[in-house]
Amino acid sequence: MKKNNEKGFALVLSLVLMLAMSLMGGALIVISAGDHQSNNTSDEYQQTFYVAETALLEGEQYLLNQFLGPWDASSHKRDTTKRVLPANQTSKYQGAMTKKNYSTKDSFYYNTGTQCFNSFPDINRKKFYVVAGESWNFGKLIRDSFDAKASVQEKKEAEKLRDYYYEYFVTRVGAATFRGYGSSVKKKASDSGSDGMAYTVYGCGIKSGKDRMVVALESNVILPK
């Protein structure tokens, strides 16, 4: 009789151990899936941050191109006769962006709307004016930069980045103290201070799709008058 009881106990113990192992296995699967999702989110955030940095650089480059004169690809020189200190538009800015390298007809089109503008809540929307506001598709920009010798794999990798957009808008803040060195930007090569014009560049990296993500950055630029 005692021997039969021991056999029954072993069966119950086996079932309990099997249940515990099943629970542990299920927990490990859930934890692993969570870590995988967390890694994906981290990678997407990092990519969106890089795209936001691109937005700032492009916004700053826009100001420099206006100040130094537009680049003429045929002569490989700048048209210095068109040099200007960019001025704000007369209409109050509501957040709309000019689509530069994509349109609503593209298969990858995503309506970014006013997401970038809304990512800067400290802006005084009652009297906010901008020089320009532009929206670019990051993946298409990279894809179009390839020449005919680019591999199929490179093109596919670039096309994966079509989920990312970078946008910037620039506002002219007003007069500011300027101190520059050399003659690349200033009219005269000296170290003396001179009046300048201050601008703020607002830039965003946007990941489209159901897991939408927006990273907003800003920088200040002062150009000599």
Image (spheres, rainbow, N blue to C red):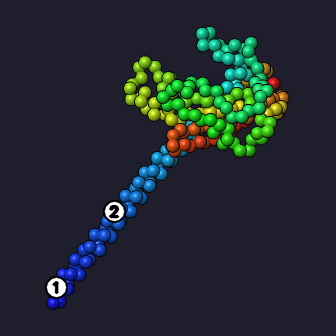
- Residue 59, can we see it? no
Which residue is nearer to you in this view: 125 or 140?
125
Element on which disc 1 rests: helix
Q: Which residue is mark 1?
A: 4
Which residue is nearer to you in this view: 88 or 190?
88
Identify the residue at image location x=53%, y=31%.
109
Location of residue 115 with respect to 89 vertically, above or below: below
x then y, percent, for residue 10: 22, 79
The N terminus: image quadrant: bottom left
Q: Residues within 10 Å of mark 1 (few under 14, many from 20)?
A: few
x then y, percent, for residue 65: 68, 22
Q: What type is the residue that disc 1 sits on? A: Asn
Left or right of 92 in this view: 9: left
Element on which disc 2 rests: helix
- Residue 135, can we see it? yes
Identify the residue at image location x=82%, y=32%.
174
Identify the residue at image location x=77%, y=32%.
92
Q: Which residue is mark 2?
A: 25
x then y, percent, for residue 179: 79, 31
CA gap, disc 2 to disc 1?
Answer: 32 Å
Closer to the camera: disc 2 or disc 1? 1
Among the 4 quarters of the image, the one containing residue 72: top right
Among the 4 quarters of the image, the one containing residue 207: top right
Q: What type is the residue that disc 2 sits on? A: Gly
Left or right of 14 in this view: 61: right
Q: Are marks 2 and 1 in contact (CB under 8 Å)?
A: no
x then y, percent, for residue 3: 16, 86
Left or right of 163 in this view: 149: left
Identify the residue at image location x=79%, y=34%.
173
Location of residue 189 with respect to 4 vertically, above or below: above
